[in-house]
Image (tube, rainbow, N blue to C red):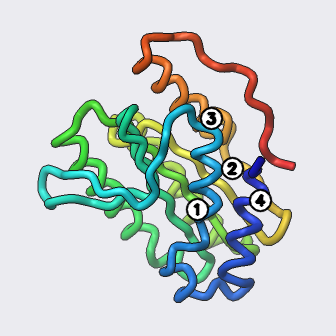
Amino acid sequence: MITINDVLNHYWDTVGTEQDTFKIRGDNHFSKLNDYLNDKIHAKGIPESFISCAYRNRKSWDMHFPDINVAIEYKTFTAKGIAGNKNNRIEEALGSSIDLKTKHPHYKLGFIAVFAFRENSMPVVKAREIVIEVFDRMISDGHYDMFLPIQTMGINNHFELSEKYSLDTFIESINYNTQQKNGSLSMKSNLNSFFV
């Protein structure tokens, strides 16, 4: 069984400590995250799945659970790019949500933000806080339904950044959506901590 620790270690194994952007663009760095979500969520997910939109013809989501109307986006924030690119990432996420939810208001959307850096300088930490605060508002405003911010600083060095938006909460929210879709409102409560 794949753990979230395996997922994040695979990220570093794939991109290397220098976080090779060519390897990141190849999208193999999160292939184990696809496997992990398919293992934990009680529905069949399709990686890199296109969903029709209101303003664009379609948009590819990192993981799509069509049977339960859930789509998830993953994004990496690195120390080199977070300060300058945080607003672009936020705008992309907001635009994708509006585009999909305008056409499919019944969809539930999730966003996994992987902050992949060892650096703890004030500008980097502040930029990370801004991203988390903005996604908290986007959840409150109904643009997103689930959010998971995770910090990874290298092999076997990962931690959650929010008690409110924990890994357990993210998975349980999706599985709760599955149970509602299937007519059962009982929430599964036997999820263990996935950090090893």
Q: Are marks 3 and 1 in contact (CB under 8 Å)?
A: no
Is 3 or 44 nearer to us in this picture? 44
Q: Position of residue 31 (x, y in %)?
A: 59, 64
Q: Residue at x 62, y 35 (%)?
A: 164
Q: Nearer the viewer, mark 1 or mark 4?
A: 4
Q: Residue at x 48, y 80 (%)?
A: 25
Q: Which residue is mark 4?
A: 6
**Which label sits on residue 164?**
3
Q: Position of residue 160 (x, y in %)?
A: 72, 49
| Tag 2 secondary structure | loop
Q: Which residue is mark 2?
A: 161
Q: Are marks 1 and 4 in contact (CB under 8 Å)?
A: no
Q: CA distance from mark 4 to mark 2?
A: 18 Å
Q: Which residue is mark 1?
A: 128
Q: Amino acid at mark 3?
A: Lys
| Tag 1 secondary structure | helix
Decide: is 64 above or below 171.
below
| Tag 4 secondary structure | helix
